[in-house]
């Protein structure tokens, strides 16, 4: 039997720009996540989760080619792992399994915006890698999970996949996949895995030990796919985002909290001035207003979900204020780093 713990993720800076290849974001992996357990099965394969009402029964060599049900992310991850193993003769063949997914990425009022779908695809890839002793590199696991997620969601930067795969806090530069022609398999094309992905860069950052993260979850569900679908950002926005994010990376490396706080504020202002009014919901407006003397901003796509604060002192007053305004708080612990860098 294999059991793996998979982190959640929190975008800290560079949102929206990161959806354009070659741009950079800063993403943290969180110890609030999920676990994936795999045990051998003597009959058909099955999958169950504490967040879904129905089990899924399937055959490992014959997963149905449809990705619209509750199990679509798991289905896509298993399909691409299976097909990748098949073309790589050095790896073992897959056998029937029982999969159990236990998630802590939902609170009593719903999802808390830490990337549950990304964690699921990474979790399935990691668990299969361990259980079948596939010895896949971190980069290969990242690519497998990325293509499974991209196939289902059809867009996104894959920064959440990178953070969850590599752990810690990363600077992530998004790849340009435009040269890869999609077949009738869509993005579930295992031949893409072993090819270089232009512009991709993943670098671990040394997060200062005395900086802590506080999540503010609004429980206003954000649909990232819809949020980014009709937004076109000018080159000026992308250049400014790159400049700001690089400055924030430098403040993390040097541990300069004052300049880090200013960098987050600059990034937030850039996003606020370039995105539709709905980007800042009433609760997120309250959250931003409360960050006068504390580093922080909206995390991810906005239009709901969450914001965060980074503090190096007492923030009881901030916790109390957010809770008064129905913003759930959770101190976030950063998940351990797994890799040094990939560039």
Image: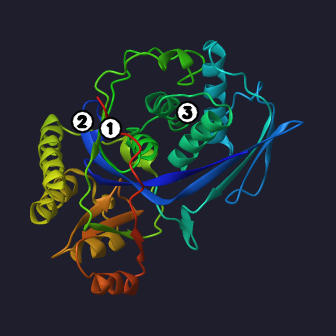
The residue depicted at 78 percent of the width and 53 percent of the height is: 54
- How would you rate the neighbour count of disc 1 (Cα within 10 Å): few for under 14, some for 14-19, many for 20 or more? many
Q: Position of residue 342 (x, y in %)?
A: 32, 31
In the rendered image, is residue 68 in sight?
A: no
Q: Position of residue 30 (x, y in %)?
A: 43, 58
Mark 2–mark 1 CB contact (< 8 Å): yes
In the picture, the disc for residue 23 is 2
- Looking at marks 2 and 3 on the same chain, the residue that comes earlier in the sequence is marked by 2
Q: Work out how far the residue at label 3 is from the one at label 1, CA to CA, in angstroms.
A: 17 Å
In the rendered image, is residue 157 in sight?
A: yes
The residue depicted at 43 percent of the width and 30 percent of the height is: 139
- How would you rate the neighbour count of disc 2 (Cα within 10 Å): few for under 14, some for 14-19, many for 20 or more? many
Q: Position of residue 170 (x, y in %)?
A: 31, 45
In the picture, the disc for residue 148 is 3
Quarter-of-image position of residue 42: top right
In the picture provided, is 129 more to the left or to the right than 1? left
Q: Work out how far the residue at label 2 is from the one at label 3, CA to CA, in angstroms.
A: 22 Å
In the picture provided, is 203 more to the left or to the right than 80? left
- How would you rate the neighbour count of disc 3 (Cα within 10 Å): few for under 14, some for 14-19, many for 20 or more? many
Q: Quadrant where the C terminus lies?
A: top left
SS at circle 1: helix
SS at circle 2: loop
Q: Position of residue 150 (x, y in %)?
A: 49, 33
* Frontmost residue, 218 versus 275: 218
In the picture, the disc for residue 297 is none
Q: Quadrant where the N terminus lies?
A: top right
- Looking at marks 3 and 1 on the same chain, the residue that comes earlier in the sequence is marked by 1
Report the residue marked by disc 1: 19
């Amino acid at each position: 039997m294999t059991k793996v713990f998979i982190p959640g993720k929190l975008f800290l800076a560079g949102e929206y720009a990161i959806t354009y290849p070659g741009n950079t974001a800063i993403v943290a992996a969180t110890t609030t996540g999920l676990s994936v357990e795999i045990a051998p099965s003597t009959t058909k394969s099955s999958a169950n989760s504490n967040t879904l009402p129905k089990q899924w029964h399937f055959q490992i060599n014959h997963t149905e080619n449809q990705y619209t049900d509750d199990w679509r992310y798991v289905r896509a991850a298993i399909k691409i792992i299976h097909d990748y193993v098949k073309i790589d003769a050095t790896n073992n063949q897959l056998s029937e399994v029982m999969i159990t997914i236990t998630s802590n990425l939902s609170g009593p009022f719903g999802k808390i915006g830490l990337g549950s779908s990304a964690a699921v695809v990474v979790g399935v890839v990691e668990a299969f890698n361990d259980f079948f002793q596939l010895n896949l590199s971190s980069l290969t696991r990242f690519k497998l999970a990325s293509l499974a997620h991209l196939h289902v969601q059809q867009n996104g930067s894959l920064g959440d996949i990178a953070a969850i795969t590599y752990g810690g806090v990363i600077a992530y530069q998004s790849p340009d996949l435009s040269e890869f022609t999609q077949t009738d398999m869509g993005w579930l094309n295992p031949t893409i895995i072993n090819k270089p992905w232009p512009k991709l860069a993943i670098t671990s950052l040394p997060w200062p030990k005395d900086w802590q993260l506080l999540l503010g979850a609004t429980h206003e569900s954000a649909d990232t796919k819809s949020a980014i679908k009709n937004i076109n950002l000018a080159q000026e926005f992308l250049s400014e985002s790159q400049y700001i994010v690089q400055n924030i990376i430098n403040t993390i490396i040097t541990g300069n909290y004052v300049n880090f706080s200013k960098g987050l504020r600059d990034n937030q202002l850039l996003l606020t001035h370039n995105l539709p009014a709905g980007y800042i919901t009433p609760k997120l407006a309250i959250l931003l207003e409360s960050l006068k003397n504390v580093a922080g901003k909206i995390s991810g796509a906005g239009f709901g979900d969450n914001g965060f604060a980074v503090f190096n002192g007492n923030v009881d007053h901030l916790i109390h204020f957010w809770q008064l305004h129905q913003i759930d708080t959770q101190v976030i612990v950063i998940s351990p780093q797994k890799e040094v860098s990939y560039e």
